[in-house]
Each structure stands twice: as C-alpha cells, then as structure tokens.
Amino acid sequence: MAAALFLTAQQVPVLVLERSKVGHADPRAATYHPPTLEMLAESGVTDELHRRGIVARRWQFRDRRAGLVAEFDLGVLQADTPYPYRLQCEQHKLVAMLAERVRASPLAEIRTGGEVVGVEQAESGVTVTIDHDGVQSTESGTWLIGADGGRSIVRKSQQIDFEGFTWPERFLVITTDFDFESLGYAYSSYTMDPDEWTATFKVPGEDNSGLWRSVFPTHPEQDEAELLDFGAAHRRLVALAPSARDARIVHTNLYGVHQRVASRYREGRVLLVGDAAHVNNPLGGMGLNFGVHDAHSLAAKLAQVWHGQAQPQRLDLYDRQRRAVAEQFLQSQTIANKQALEERDPRKRAERQQEMQRTAADPELARRYLLRTSMIEGLRAAARIA
C-alpha cells in the first residue's frame, strides 16, 4: 500500500493484488521512526497517525533486576528531523489509512481475495497468475513489485536467494491492559536479562484507551499452545511485573524470527520491497519502517522510468542503495539489539550498561547513537551510494 501510495502521487498507475479479503488486525509492528513520518507527511497519513497514535519522546534501556539503566531523549534530533520522536500506532491502522488514499486515486485499483501463484517475465512486461478460490486468471503489467512478505512467491519465482539465518527461539508477544508507565517505563523500553529479556511498548488499542505489548524470547522446545495460553502468559507477565497480578491479557502471538536479505532486489521487470526483500527481528522497531523506505525509494526511481525521465537501469540504483543499507544497518543493528538484551557475561553486560549511560548523558553521543537507531543515518548512507 505504501508503494502504491507513493507511485500514484507521482502519476504512475497501479494495480494492487491482495490475497486477503479483509485486513489483518492481529498484533504486528507499531513503531514509526522520524524518516517514515517525513515520507508519509505529504499524503496526510502522518497527521492521521498523530491523531490516532502515541508520541514516544523517550525510550529506555532497563535491567530486569536493577531497573532503569539509561533513558534516551529523541529531542536531541530536533535539528535533524521535524519529528524528533517515535510514534506508536498499530500496523493495521496504517494499512487502512494508506488503502483509503490509494482507493481515492483514479490511477489505482485494489483487488482482494486473489493470490498470486505464478510470475512470468517478458522483455516488455510481466504476467502474473492469480488464484481466486480455485479459479485461475492472469494479469499483465509493465513492472511487478513483490511486496508479498518473507515467503514471497514473487521472489521465489525469480530464483532470488534469501540469504541469512533463523533464530532458534520464537518470540512471544503478550498484549495487556496493565499500565507499565506506573512502574516508570517509557512508552518504548528494552529490558536486559540473560534468561528472559523483554521489549515493552504502548499502543493505542482499538478504543484508544491504551494497551501494552511485551515481547519475550521462548525456548525452542516449548509447546506452542502452552506459550499462547492466556494463563501462562499472565504468569509470565507477573514474573516481570508482580503488580500486574490483576491485569487482563488481551492477546498473545508467537512467531519465528529471521535475519535474511535477498541477494538482489531487481530481476528485470520484477522488484522487491519490504519483507520480500529482507526480514529481521523486531527489536528496535525497524522492519515496517525499512519497508516503507524501500517503497519510497523505489517509487521515486520507477516514476522517473515510467515518465521517460530515466532508463530502466535507474532501478539498479534502488537495488544498490537499499540492499547495502539492509545489510549494513538493518541487519547489524537489529542483531546487535538482541545480543545486547540477552548478554550472559556479567562483565560484558555491566560494560554495555555503562556505555549506554555515558551515551545517554552526553547530548552529542546521544545524537549520533539516535541518528542510527532512528534510521536517519542509514538513509543518509543510502543517498551517498551512486
């Protein structure tokens, strides 16, 4: 939907093919970094996110036993972005905002309920086979953008390798009405622990009364049904925050976690964005944002090609820029985030915490660190790639 929005804004016609008939409402990403808000501002989506979301001006590193370690104020980025904070709003709400605007464009069509099951390229275009409840049809276009997730049929159809690894543990997300702010938590917090680290953040919820999500690691051998059980989830929550004993569990979700990047983002007239091009662990809230950045970068270059302002080779620059920063920034940062939270060596953990305290206390060190974690540095690096 982001790719469609950016393309129609530049007068490029699009057909969006979506397998589902209704939108997903299960807990997914919910954090928006400053560059993403900048990219979505012109469409009005950023204003709507502000009306419906939660602004998180600070985020914390915590220790499960010692409490607060360091707090980062994103206000130090005020000279670098008009949005020096994180904004938190559930992904399915963003998709609805995007879809509303795409549908309003005379250049766009959205078709739901049909799954792309095959892709064929020719010199002048791409044809996809669509399965709709067992009935197959085809649709042709000049370019195809594969935005179909980590198991991307589009990527596989082009024999593009998806290089990387899968973490042995799955991540458990517990959504609750317990107010972690009562314990001093910022709206976005990361709690270190060698046995069970946690990432905790606040989202608006369906009625905007506010809910909190906590992400926990699990042991690979644990039973899925047991992990998802609300009673077990409540016990895990109370072990983290004993005062949550009267809290209500709203939702649980369990998913595998991968760190992979496609070996190329362009194969002829087929291009990849988002999870079809790269997947990563969610610590730091970067995956959704990186996908929007892909779409923004690709749309600008594809519009130039569409309008005859550039040759198709212009799209190779998209591949060079976005794949480079996926490997150098997205993967390295999210892996480092996980390793920092789960560090088992007491000496290394103490050194890491002291480093975080020094960084947070020094405005210039904090700014440099937040430029990276807020994804501004990665975008600047991509812009330098020719």
Image (cartoon, helix red, strand yellow):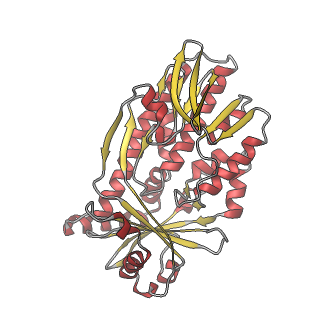
- For the point 41% across and 68% down, the residue is 228
Residue 50 on image: x %, y %: 68, 61
Which quarter of the figure has residue 4?
Answer: top right
Residue visible at 40% across and 86% down? 242
Residue 183 place in picture, x, y as percent: 47, 82
| Quadrant holding the N terminus | top right
From the viewer's perspective, is residue 353 above or below residue 24? below
- Compared across the picture, whether 354 is left or right of 27 comes to left
Q: Is residue 111 above or below residue 200?
A: above
Q: How many marks?
A: 0
Q: Residue at x 75, y 42 (%)?
A: 103
Q: Position of residue 290 (x, y in %)?
A: 51, 45
Out of 385 and 310, give the one closest to the viewer: 310
Q: Residue at x 52, y 34 (%)?
A: 383
**Front-most of residues 13 and 17:** 17
Residue 71 rendering spot, x and y as whole percentages = 45, 69
Judge left or right: residue 290 versus residue 234: right
**Image quadrant of residue 222?**
bottom left
